[in-house]
Image (cartoon, coloured by chain):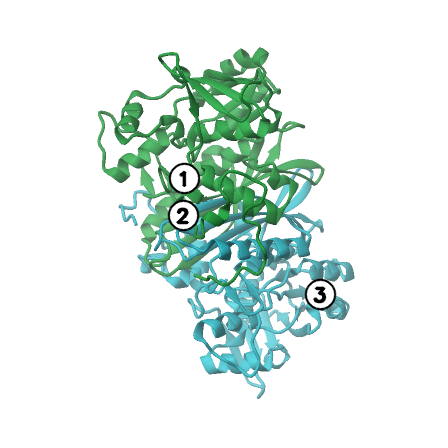
Chain colours: A green, B cyan
Amino acid sequence: MNSQPNDSQTDFQGPVCPVPLRDYPEVVLGHGSGGQLTQELIAHLFVPAFGSPELEQLGDAAVLSLAGGQVALATDSFVVQPLFFPGGDIGQLAVHGTINDLAMMGAKPVALAAAFILEEGFSMETLARVVQSMARAAKAAGVSIVTGDTKVVQRGHGDGCYITTTGLGLVRSRVPPAPQRVVPGDAVLLSGTVADHGMAVMSVRQGLEFEAPIRSDTAPLHELVAAMFQACPEIHALRDPTRGGLAAALNEIAQAAGVGIQIDDQAVPVDPVVASACEMLGLDPLAVANEGKLVAFVPQEHASRVLEAMRNHPLGRRAALIGHAVADHPGTVVARTAVGATRVITTQLGEALPRIC
Amino acid sequence: MNSQPNDSQTDFQGPVCPVPLRDYPEVVLGHGSGGQLTQELIAHLFVPAFGSPELEQLGDAAVLSLAGGQVALATDSFVVQPLFFPGGDIGQLAVHGTINDLAMMGAKPVALAAAFILEEGFSMETLARVVQSMARAAKAAGVSIVTGDTKVVQRGHGDGCYITTTGLGLVRSRVPPAPQRVVPGDAVLLSGTVADHGMAVMSVRQGLEFEAPIRSDTAPLHELVAAMFQACPEIHALRDPTRGGLAAALNEIAQAAGVGIQIDDQAVPVDPVVASACEMLGLDPLAVANEGKLVAFVPQEHASRVLEAMRNHPLGRRAALIGHAVADHPGTVVARTAVGATRVITTQLGEALPRIC
């Protein structure tokens, strides 16, 4: 590792709250959590340095005008540990995760690039299982893996297998969904239960056993999104609540749109086994990662139509209206609890569940 | 690391030479070398599993029809160690390397995605230097970094900073250059000296001192390529000889096109300091990585025009005609030596210089 003097005058303070980056002289796990520390790294370092208008949108994917159409580009590295978990594996996740980032821009996924960073000594059989799982997931989703790269690092400088997938998609609507389009009054729709993926991975890592096994919800969401757009082209924003969970997704949208968000705790579907696992580990299900769920903001007058379309799709059967965007408390997400009190839902600072995807 | 049984019936033998993959139960450094072991991994595992026509082309980038035009998609992970070396750093390399992969398909680079895998404890100042170097390189090349991702892994599971960049480009010509288009008689043009990048990195790693410092040749080649296409749209194949060097690039083309290649050892420009460094370390300059050079196959009748265009560009000043594609010995590359003998130029099996990019 290098630690040469910073000759490039980084403004670690920058104009953005909350914590100045210089308070972290070293990268900590939380910088990869999808929580506040990740947002800070993006706001203080990546956006000022790269300074492209697409990056500033902070979407799940960038939308570009190209070759007379609009295309979406999304990239994601996968470092989940263990590589195999109930309901999925790193290969599937690497395909679904990037497809979903494209889908959240209303794009139809077309092609994937796959880059592997392998650790010397990694089992060739295991690599083959991962690659074949990726191939199956891509085929099932109707997406081609068209190019790739392989690097190998010495023992002790990796963890078996890291995969970076980058997806290219065709944007369907002229005005793609974006957090900035959310307005007070919009209904908040959630496609199903939360926290399944995070708790599936945690249960393997911790060796926990529950009355029923918890399975990851990993799934490609582009067809669910297509069905929703067919029901109503007026979808203001879409987000797949992965790292940081529903809490982080809602906070990002509240802040980007300058609206408040009110949700009803009781309306958020959580599988009972997952709920008790969360309680046992002291985790809020709203802050736990999902890999096959989305949250949508739609005008209230279209909410029931979109909800119906979601429920008619296998990946949206338990879809629910969980709340609304409001003019009050802009930038803040609050939940009404079972006993009628309200609590503020914050984005976690750092890493409750490291390397969850 | 996992080593669960292979339930997916991988055909490690497959129909492709040379060494069956099952002879390597574990990933070795050579699988990331760009040499024969990498080719074998691609041929026995990735291509059969993913089975897309674009991947089978084995180009530096995939070419796709999209939105009424042709776009190119290329991805590359960068794991070079050390992160900073004379003439460049991992950030620059990550931008140039992917731009060059697009350029080799005759594509104009449009946008880059950047995914970081950081190791817990990595210096924030060093990260800032890397990011700002990327930003400068992208700006200088006229390419936007439009989207990204950051993951953090625990200490001992990374090496400071790995970067995966994926590039999207617009293909200029209706029939993009491809190894398969090479025919006997084509002239082989090289844009400048070889082995500079590899020896720059090696000299830092080994703490070697020479009469003059060896600097990496890292550079974006898309404008040189544009100038070449302007001089002659009939460029059959382009390759940037990175990992595995010129030897690997020529062998890949010879095999893909089913032609022989004859080059003249004396015609290949090598900086004298680099040449003696190679000699000292027992390395063939033809097998050492470059990051700002290209090799082009063009019909003999256009060779002098293309060569002139190359020499008129700052990145092609030392361009040279180094040989020809021939009908003899298909799939094999031979060089005429200084004493008039011929030697066969093979692709190295594995890794002479690990983690060179």
Depicted A149 relative to depicted B345: above or below: above
Q: Residue at x 54, y 30 (%)?
A: A104
Q: Which residue is mark 3?
A: B299
Circle 1 chain: A
**Kind of element beneath mark 1:** loop
Q: Which residue is mark 2?
A: A28
> What is the C-alpha distance between the residues marked 1 and 3?
58 Å
Q: Which residue is mark 1?
A: A350
> What is the C-alpha distance between the residues marked 3 and 2?
55 Å
In the picture provided, is B58 more to the left or to the right than B157? Answer: right
In the picture provided, is A281 more to the left or to the right than B315? Answer: left
Three-letter amino acid code at the position of disc 3:
Pro
Depicted A311 relative to depicted A203: above or below: above
Circle 2 chain: A
The mark nearer the N terminus, 1 or 2, is: 2
**Between tags 3 and 2, which lies in front?**
2
Q: Residue A292 versus residue A141: which sits nearer the camera?
A: A292
Q: Residue B162 versus residue A100: which sits nearer the camera?
A: B162
Q: Residue A218 versus residue A298: which sits nearer the camera?
A: A298
